[in-house]
Amino acid sequence: MSRNPKYTLDWYLKWAACILLLVAMSIRGVDGYYIHDLVLSIIGVFLWLAVSVIWKDRALILLNSVGLVLMVNNLFAIN
């Protein structure tokens, strides 16, 4: 049995983020889907950043905020 509460805002956000990131990883490297991978990754990392803030976990906040900046930078670099 899980010690973490279920069906709370952070629970939904973390599962949505995980699914989006897994979909992004599954299409990574497929020719013609770079932008889709990047957009799904940005949304997933943004959702994990929201979870990190809810949890007040500074290491995850740092990781996801820097990752978000780098991915958004890549998005603007390709246009």
Image: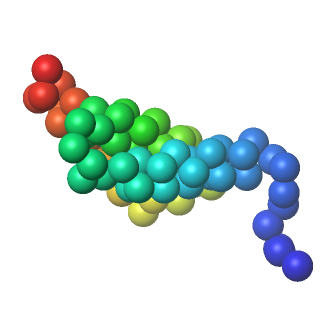
Q: Quadrant of residue 13?
A: top right
- Which residue is pictured at 36% across the width and 49% down the height? 27
| Quadrant in which the C terminus is drawn | top left
| Quadrant in which the N terminus is drawn | bottom right
- Which residue is pictured at 81% across the width and 47% down the height? 8
Res. 18 in view: yes
Residue 52 to residue 78: above or below: below
- Which residue is pictured at 38% across the width and 55% down the height? 25
The residue positioned farthest toward the right in the image shown? 1
The residue positioned farthest toward the front in the image shown? 31
The residue positioned farthest toward the top in the image shown? 79
Q: Quadrant of residue 35?
A: top left
Residue 19 in the image, given as x and y percentages of width and height: 57, 51
Count of all numbered marks drawn on residues in the image? 0
* Nearer the observer, 74 or 52: 74
* Nearer the observer, 62 or 12: 12
Residue 73 in the image, given as x and y percentages of width and height: 18, 33
Residue 45 in the image, given as x and y percentages of width and height: 43, 45
Residue 77 to residue 21: above or below: above
Residue 10 in the image, given as x and y percentages of width and height: 70, 48
